Amino acid sequence: MREQEFARLARRRPALEARARVLQALRAWFASEGFLEVETPARVRAPGQELHLDAIAAGAEPGLDRHPRWLITSPEYAMKRLAGAGYERIVQFGKCWRAGEIGPHHQPEFTMIEWYRAHAPLSAIADDCETLVRLAAQALGRTLPPAFDPPFARVGMSELVREAANVTIAGDETVEELRKAVLQAGVDPRQASRWDDVFFQLWLDKVDPLLAQRPPTFVFDWPAPLAALARRKPGAPHLAERFELYAQGLELANAYGELTDPVEQRRRFEEENRDRGALSKIQHPIDEDLITALARMPPTAGVALGFDRLMMLVLGTQEIRDVLAFAADEV
Amino acid sequence: MYDTSDIRKGLKMMVDGQPYTVVEFQFVKPGKGAAFTRTKIKNLLTGAVLERNFRSGEKFEPANVEIKSMQYLFREADSCVFMDTTTYDQVSIPVRTIGDAQDFMPEQIVVDVLFYEGRTVGVTLPNFIEQAIVETEPGFKGDTSTNTTKPAKISTGATINVPLFIMVGDTVKIDTRTGDYLERVARA
């Protein structure tokens, strides 16, 4: 067993060295762009109530209060509190934890790069993502295939779904209408009754395979039911100002034109907590400091990019464990 | 009742009214969506392999299949006769149900016979068998290269590719899933 561990760690050495070089290059770039690198707590009282994320329990602080602590699923809330206090360009390189996520592209503990630009459009964040991919390859002396020459393709969700499945999904249909369209595309959503579940059945069956074949692609204009913390698109309220970056079958980054409306944000949190209750999931408290911060936040675009997946992309590995010193089953 | 957390290689479950076995599975999670299990599943009746994505929490009926360890006795006309190694019951299975497995099914071999709702629907061979070569061109003793091959016949009548040094009477190990020669286990 011990011998196997030595062999495995020796095998991973080039990947670990590459991680360190890329991290250094990215940090230097963020600094040159005027970003302040911040570190926010890993343990919080309000880890976020996004329906499909499960936080990992992290004890309590009996000397302080009676609230349980949780490991963050993303540093988003704390970073927005900074953004609301006038921090205009901030970046964080840090660990996040999501219970139960283990697969070729998933580990329950992973490294995220999250950054926010005040007074910048969402497209500026897409430009940043292109830069990061280029810098990562450069730091390793690698040349990316021509498909990776910027700018990457920027397509609307609806356009991509039409290309993949030959049906039209605008984002404002009812669940019944959506089910009908998905069935028409030859996909059976079976027992799914939630809008997002029906949508993602189509996404996985039809769109994911297409994205895996395409050159790197930003998918913009997500349906409002999948807006999460994004604001609605001005002039098209059935769409959210959000993009996801996909490359080589990897979902690399998720970005928002940030929602800065505290009333709307509270409404979404309450709705998510109701949904969590309906699925017998833990309901977390609403982060009131975040709600207050949103009211002061200037128009801001922000993104979370999976650093481990970026390394998978530039090193061409198939499994996330190949770019980690220790995967969850190796600790 | 199974749900997606029970999915493992080899799990036998009903999908669209047909019995399937899981060939491959992995965790996937589209951004902001629910977790799914991406699978390759094999239809136990037709052998067809499908890709299906199941949302976490989806439920399945177990497939009413039973696997019995049985010994292949002999062939008669269009079927093969097997004996249950514990009860000594005999069953006759049509050769078209057995399919390509016949190539690597010498008499006396013990195989897994699959029953679906009491009916035989297929046999699964052990992954490896050892068989004597009954017919091949003369070998070249000095040639130990495994890159160059020649055809050779085994006792079931199937032909496989073997290295040039293999001679009639040698016993070789074969992967029944691919029909590939693996190694020589005994010399003539």
Image (tube, coloured by chain):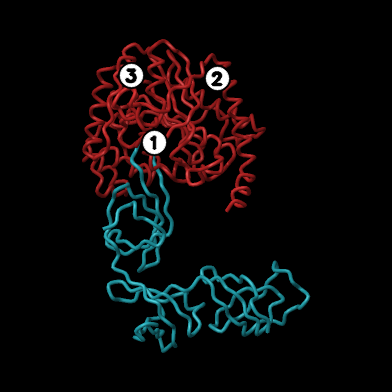
- Whether B161 is drawn above or below A232: the answer is below
Q: Are marks 3 and 1 in contact (CB under 8 Å)?
A: no
Which of the chains is cyan? B
The image quarter containing residue B114 is bottom left
Measure the C-alpha gap from mark 2 to mark 1: 25 Å
From the viewer's side, name the closer residue of B77 and A328: A328
* Colour applied to chain A: red
Q: Which amino acid does label 3 sit on?
A: Leu
Residue corresponding to mark 2? A30
Residue A290 is labelled as 3
Residue A81 image position (x, y, % from top left): 38, 17
Residue A56 image position (x, y, % from top left): 37, 36
Whether residue A158 is visible to the viewer of this picture, yes or no, is yes
- Whether A177 is drawn above or below A24: the answer is below
Q: Circle 1 marks a residue in which chain?
A: B
Residue corresponding to mark 1? B31
Say if labels 2 and 3 share a chain: yes
